[in-house]
Image: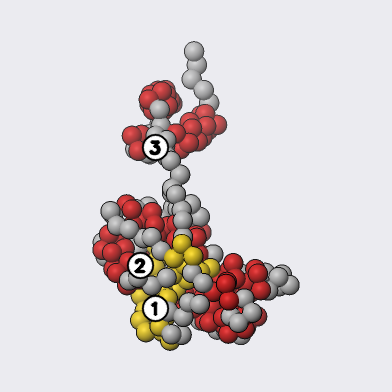
Amino acid sequence: MVNSYVCFDLETTGLSPEKDEIIEIGAVKVAEGKVIDRFSRFVKPDNPISPLVTSLTGISNDMVANAGPTDRTIYDFLYFCEEYPVVGHNLMFDYRFTYRYAKKYYMDFKKEGLDTLKIARKVLPELPSRSLESLCDHYGIVNVSAHRAYHDALATAKLYQTLKYYFGASEAKLFNAEPLVWKQKKVQPATNRQKEYLKELAKYHRIEVNSDLESLTRSEASRLIDKILFQYGRMAR
């Protein structure tokens, strides 16, 4: 049964670990049930944070403007984690993002972990919702700033300890860490024909394509072509 771990949470610009970006990392390090260290950093994304994301997370472009180098932030977080297993609510969401960022900067994030959402689904099937917010309400856990990474990580750590207190004896297997496995989807680059067609469309309609054509994936190029055709129409033959 896991009693020492790092519980972490991310705030991101979207749901896709392949396309969206991390904007905040929060974590607590727990040893034998007691918080012994904390981690909280902003991450400046390559693209501006949208008003929708700001409304959901409370994180604005001004807040991340002075964030340190992203590679250093990721390194510091991985160093913070040491060899501890990780805990999270809907853990694979956060793990996938962190794994991708680690790989991007030639680092490794192979971990064992536990998911409080998975545990709650097993032991609390009667609840209408097993969201972090709902579970905190159910157990009277105060989260002073929901949807901010550090506070969600702290609330998740408290939730894990609570679930372990009530169900650790009867459902011991649920509180053992398991290897986290995720393989990134193979990304297919845009074809030469797609890139040439985009250039022809842009020239014909006298528009600027605000994308680096060489970095587009096949699916991204296809969506961009469809968008241009929808907005401006096809080229006359």
Crowding at label 2, few (<14), some or many (≥20) Cα neighbours within 10 Å?
many
Location of residue 10 in the rendering, given as x and y in whole percent from the top left corner: 44, 65
Q: Which mark is residue 200?
A: none
Q: Is residue 135 visible?
A: no
Q: Earlier in the sequence, mark 2 or mark 1?
A: 1
Q: Which residue is mark 2?
A: 42
Residue at image position (48%, 20%) is 235
Residue at image position (58%, 85%) is 165
Q: Earlier in the sequence, mark 1 or mark 3?
A: 1
Judge by depth and name the residue closer to the eye, 122 or 131: 122
Residue at image position (38%, 54%) is 100
Cα gap from disc 2 to disc 3, whole angstroms = 27 Å
Location of residue 110 in the rendering, given as x and y in whole percent from the top left corner: 38, 60
Is 83 left or right of 225, judged from the image as shown?
A: left
Judge by depth and name the residue closer to the eye, 174 or 236: 174
Q: Nearer the viewer, mark 1 or mark 3?
A: 1
Cα gap from disc 2 to disc 1, whole angstroms = 18 Å
Q: Is residue 86 visible?
A: yes
Contact (CB < 8 A) between labels 2 and 3? no
In terms of secondary structure, where does tag 3 sit? loop
Is 136 left or right of 114, judged from the image as shown?
A: right
Q: Nearer the viewer, mark 2 or mark 1?
A: 1
Amino acid type indicated by mark 1: Lys
Location of residue 145 in the rendering, given as x and y in whole percent from the top left corner: 49, 77
In terms of secondary structure, where does tag 2 sit? strand
Q: Which residue is mark 1?
A: 29
Location of residue 111 in the rendering, given as x and y in whole percent from the top left corner: 41, 63
Q: Which residue is mark 3?
A: 216
